[in-house]
Image (spheres, grey):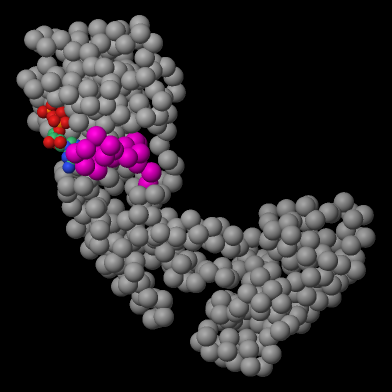
């Protein structure tokens, strides 16, 4: 499998060690693994720089360990490296859908034509294959055998040397019969990509396919960048299939190189057998190479824990109910002026007595410690900080590596938010008179 060392690196990422050291070690190992897979060094450096920056700047929301948070950052950045979170569109947008396969010699076109035919047949489409590779003597027979194996008819003219004429006639043949997907296999006589692209333009100009698919062998690694970018610039209806991912250590290089050109990888070939073709979904691919079996769960938790006051939070604040999660959101967005303070300042006439304020410099210094303390709290403590007694203060401070005094100061902060919240509750009528319901206040706090 491509990048098969990645699982080990992920498994070895230990959060109990000093976070920064763990991150640096992880990043070093990741760089080695990506370079081993022939990913372009500049891409590797950009990627790991971004990961380090995000790891240093972003804080895990409460309820999420730093390890999970860090891995979700790595996951997101790797997904970007391999083409972004979108799953490619493989459903034919119209019928018939004419696909022209092109590629350098031996890249796997004929095999891929058979695999694609099988894929679309299983999806319920009526598929026809056209054997327009008139260069390699065995190509027609090879495609015919593949077609027979999967029950897909093959149009060909053994003996003819006119590839364009076969392609045009083949498409006509299947179009008349009402076929949904028509796949044309072409010759890969070229060693040089210039010749290949020139001929592709010629055939495409006359056959007018709906999609031109470049078939690329993964073992060319990052060299795929050149071929893919030239192809991408030449055809507006192009997509790419990367084959033989199973047989090379350079697959990561090929995939990232193609993604870097902006071209879309639709499928990948993962073996010689007819069903060894997969829709290339960068999210699933990265999850698999990272060995994140519980990826859905992890991402769900990240999503849930995203730092933003929800409508429910605002409602709770206005009802005088606060918890440590709300305080946390306040603290995190403090640099952008805490949401609560913001409404207090924006609404003239509100009679809210600000609890004793800590000056902003002290707040900045304290923040790191407070966030660490919040991360060491149990769910019960987050929801109901009242339960935090002396012994819990001790446990939390120990777990977070901060002073018990810091935890106590945080609890004071909580009391302050609670006090504001209670005062707001008392003035709900005034807010209502100003037309400020929960929804509007929520928007104010987020804007
Ligand atoms: N392991 C592996 N082998 C593959 C894959 N795709 C194709 N192959 C093999 O690659 C070799 C070349 O495949 P073909 O389909 O004949 O290649 P082609 O591009 O049509 O060749 P030309 O017509 O000569 O250009 C064959 O041995 C295939 O079995 C793949 O995803 N994995």
On screen, 256 above or below 322? above
Which residue is nearer to you in this view: 182 or 70?
182
User: Which image quadrant for residue 422?
Assistant: bottom right
Which residue lies at the image location 10% right of the left edge and 25% below the top edge?
Answer: 189
Which residue is nearer to you in this view: 357 or 76?
76
Question: Residue 104: x and y, percent?
Answer: 15, 30
Which residue lies at the image location 27% right of the left edge and 45% below the top edge?
Answer: 255
Question: Residue 122: x and y, percent?
Answer: 37, 30
**276 is within the stretch colored magenta:** yes
Whether residue 224 sits left or right of residue 330 in the image: it is: left
User: Which image quadrant for residue 257?
Assistant: top left
Question: Residue 125: x and y, percent?
Answer: 39, 23
Residue 314 visible to the viewer: yes
Q: Which quarter of the image is occupied by the C terminus? A: bottom right
**427 is within the stretch colored magenta:** no
Which residue lies at the image location 63% right of the left edge and 93% below the top edge?
Answer: 391
User: Which image quadrant for residue 330?
Assistant: bottom right
Instruction: For ligand 1, give the image quadrant.
Output: top left
**What are the residue bounds of the magenta stretch?**
264-282
Whether residue 52 sits left or right of residue 421 in the image: it is: left
On screen, 432 above or below 365? above
On screen, 119 above or below 341? above
On screen, 435 above or below 33? above
Whether residue 192 sits left or right of residue 69 in the image: it is: left
């Amino acid at each position: 499998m491509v990048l098969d060392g990645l699982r080990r690196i992920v498994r070895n990422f230990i959060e109990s060690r000093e976070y920064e050291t763990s991150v640096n070690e992880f990043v070093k190992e990741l760089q080695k693994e990506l370079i081993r897979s022939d990913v372009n060094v500049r891409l590797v450096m950009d990627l790991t720089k971004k990961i380090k920056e995000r790891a240093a700047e972003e804080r895990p929301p409460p309820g999420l360990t730093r390890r999970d948070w860090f891995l979700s950052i790595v996951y997101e950045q790797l997904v970007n490296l391999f083409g972004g979170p979108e799953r490619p569109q493989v459903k034919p947008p119209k019928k018939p859908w004419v696909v022209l396969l092109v590629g350098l010699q031996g890249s796997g076109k004929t095999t891929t034509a058979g695999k694609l035919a099988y894929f679309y047949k299983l999806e319920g489409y009526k598929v026809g294959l056209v054997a327009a590779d008139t260069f390699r003597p065995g190509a027609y027979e090879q495609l015919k055998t593949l077609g027979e194996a999967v029950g897909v008819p093959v149009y060909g003219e053994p003996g003819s040397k006119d590839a364009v004429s076969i392609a045009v006639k083949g498409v006509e043949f299947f179009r008349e019969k009402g076929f949904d997907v028509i796949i044309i296999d072409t010759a890969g006589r070229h060693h040089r990509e210039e010749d290949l692209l020139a001929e592709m333009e010629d055939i495409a100009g006359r056959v007018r396919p709906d999609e031109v698919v470049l078939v690329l062998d993964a073992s060319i690694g990052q060299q795929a960048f050149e071929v893919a970018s030239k192809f991408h610039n030449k055809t507006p209806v192009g997509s790419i299939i990367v084959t033989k991912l199973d047989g090379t250590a350079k697959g990561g290089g090929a995939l990232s190189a193609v993604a870097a050109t902006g071209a879309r990888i639709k499928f990948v070939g993962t073996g010689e057998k007819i069903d060894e073709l997969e829709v290339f979904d960068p999210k699933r691919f990265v999850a698999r190479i990272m060995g994140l079996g519980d990826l859905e769960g992890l991402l769900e938790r990240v999503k849930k824990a995203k730092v933003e006051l929800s409508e429910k939070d605002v409602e709770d604040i206005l009802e005088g109910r606060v918890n440590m999660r709300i305080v946390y959101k306040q603290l995190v967005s403090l640099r952008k002026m805490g949401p609560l303070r913001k409404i207090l300042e924006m609404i003239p006439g509100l009679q809210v007595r600000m609890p004793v304020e800590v000056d902003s410099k002290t707040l900045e210094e304290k923040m790191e410690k407070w966030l660490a303390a919040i991360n060491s709290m149990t769910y019960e403590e987050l929801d109901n900080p009242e339960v935090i007694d002396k012994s819990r203060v001790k446990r939390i401070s120990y777990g977070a590596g901060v002073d018990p005094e810091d935890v106590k100061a945080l609890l004071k902060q909580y009391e302050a938010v609670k006090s504001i919240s209670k005062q707001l509750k008392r003035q709900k009528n005034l807010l209502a008179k100003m037309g400020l319901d929960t929804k509007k206040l929520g928007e104010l706090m987020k804007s």
